[in-house]
Amino acid sequence: MTGGLTGQADLHCHTTASDGTLTPEQAVVRARELGLVALAITDHDVTEGVGPARTAAGRGGPEIVPGVEINAWADGTEVHVLGYYLDVDDAGLQTVLYRLRRDREERLLAMLRRLQALGMTLDPERVRAIAGEGSVGRPHVARALVERGHVASVEEAFGRLLTPGRPAYVPRHRLSPREAIAAIRRAGGVAVLAHPGLTGRDDLIPRLVGEGLQGLEVCHPQHTPRAQARYLELARRWGLVATGGSDSHGPDGPGAQRVDIGALTVDGAVVTALKRLAKGGPT
Ligand SMILES: [Zn+2]
Ligand SMILES: [Zn+2]
């Protein structure tokens, strides 16, 4: 592709605005150290990391791609939809994200009630403090459980208590992928299905394309080379932009998310393709 951004881009990372361990400023510094030409800030259900990242990047780069990763549900399966180059000031988008975060707060209190019934009392204020500026979630509950000595590790907290089928697990409010895609596109963004290899529901892809999906996250640290080849083929078949990124939650993130920024990158031409689509180009 001519006129594309030259270099490598990481199009998926989380900061302290959600459940990442690096601040947006630290993420930018890391991306700059690695010589990335672009970094997308894709926090869960929140865009507050984008502004500070842009300020930190300044004119020195990398280019900050405004993004978000929205948690949605389809037929009982959790589906993550990435949004790129959206207007973070769009009122409709922020209303959807605000509702998701409010529901997450209600979910926190429900989880704490369940833990209390198991004899594991946690102070919600402490869990929120661990979450800091980010939207509170299971990783923060897990860390609070470790802190109080109720479990030995974050992994144990997830494995014994906080995953589906375990006694303190509470499902989240279920936004549909259609609603997530619509919110992203109404805000001028490009809607991309995150890590389809983790979701394991390739049968949903045609439906999501019909609902306005424009891209597929082909490159992800937890995709095998075989899965990556398959999703590249599916992206071609459905006319979707093939994206990718590290899905880094910081070098100290939980479990499989302990991945550094830039651990997986895509060509800068992908950034150019996303920018064109966000400007209303053909899908
Ligand atoms: Zn995800
Ligand atoms: Zn992610």
Image (spheres, rainbow, N blue to C red):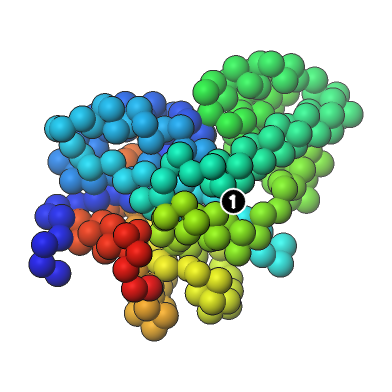
Work out whether residue 131 can be spotted. yes
Residue at horizontal 29 percent and vertical 49 percent from the top:
10
Check the picture and name the quadrant holding the C terminus: bottom left
Check the picture and name the quadrant holding the N terminus: bottom left
Residue at horizontal 81 percent and vertical 41 percent from the top:
167
Residue reaching furthest bottom? Answer: 237
**Can you tell which quarter of the image residue 28 is in?**
top left
Name the residue carrying label 1: 71
**Can you tell which quarter of the image residue 35 is in?**
top left
Neighbour tally class for label 1: few under 14, some 14-19, many 20 plus, Cα within 10 Å:
many
> Between residues 228 and 237, which one lies in front from this camera angle?
237
Residue reaching furthest right? Answer: 117
Work out whether residue 247 can be spotted. no
What type is the residue that disc 1 sits on?
Asn
Residue 138 at what x, y percent from top left?
Answer: 64, 36
Q: What element carries label 1?
A: strand
> Between residues 63 and 28, which one lies in front from this camera angle?
63
Above-or-below relation of 129 to 103: above
> Between residues 210 and 16, which one lies in front from this camera angle?
210
Above-or-below relation of 146 to 60: above
Residue at horizontal 89 percent and vertical 29 percent from the top:
117
Whether the residue carrying mark 1 lies under 8 Å from ligand 1 is answered with yes
The answer to whether residue 243 is left or right of residue 253 is left
The answer to whether residue 111 is left or right of residue 46 is right
Residue at horizontal 61 percent and vertical 46 percent from the top:
96
Residue 30 at what x, y percent from top left?
Answer: 25, 33
